[in-house]
Image (tube, helix red, strand yellow):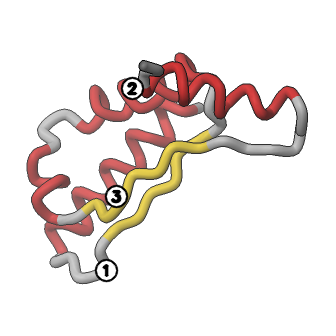
């Protein structure tokens, strides 16, 4: 059985054949419950950055639900800020 980790590494190695290829991880449908559960945005962001580095990925694509209230929007901004810092 091939592990998910092996598949991700093999997928990222496709960049060896096409230098213009970008391989990213996708965080799908981030919403209120997910943001509310993030107590430490910086730790989460560092984990995402570590994941990208460990697997040779180029970045992160984030989907979010547009029906957020102001408090959720603020949390989302904090998440994006922490990701920007961790990925710099």
Residue 74 figure quarter: bottom left
The quadrant of the image that shows the C terminus is top right
| 3 or 81: nearer the viewer | 3
Residue in front for this viewpoint, 19 or 39:
19
Q: Residues within 10 Å of mark 1 (few under 14, many from 20)?
A: few
For image coordinates 18% across by 54% down, the residue present is 35
Q: Disc 2 designates what residue?
A: 46
For the residues bearing labels 2 and 3, Cβ distance under 8 angstroms: no
For the residue labelled by badge 2, is the local secondary structure a helix, a strand or a loop? helix
Question: CB atoms at circles 2 and 1 under 8 Å apart?
Answer: no
Q: CA distance from mark 2 to mark 1?
A: 25 Å
Q: Nearer the viewer, residue 39 or 59?
A: 59
Query: Which residue is labeled 1 in the image?
Result: 66
Quadrant showing the N terminus: top left
Q: Residue at x 60, y 23 (%)?
A: 9
**Foreground disc of the pair 2, 3:** 2
Task: Tell me if mark 3 has few (under 14), some (14-19) or many (20+) residues whose alpha carbon lies within 10 angstroms of its own.
Answer: few
Q: Nearer the viewer, residue 9 or 86?
A: 9
Marks 3/1: CA–CA distance: 13 Å
Residue that label 3 marks: 77
């Amino acid at each position: 059985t091939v592990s998910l980790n092996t598949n991700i590494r093999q997928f990222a190695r496709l960049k060896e054949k096409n230098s213009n290829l970008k391989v990213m991880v996708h965080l799908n449908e981030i919403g209120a419950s997910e943001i509310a559960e993030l107590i430490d945005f910086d730790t989460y962001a560092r984990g995402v950055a570590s994941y990208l580095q460990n697997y040779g990925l180029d970045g992160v694509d984030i989907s979010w639900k547009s029906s957020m209230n102001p408090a959720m929007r603020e949390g989302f901004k904090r998440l994006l800020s922490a990701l920007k810092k961790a990925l710099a």
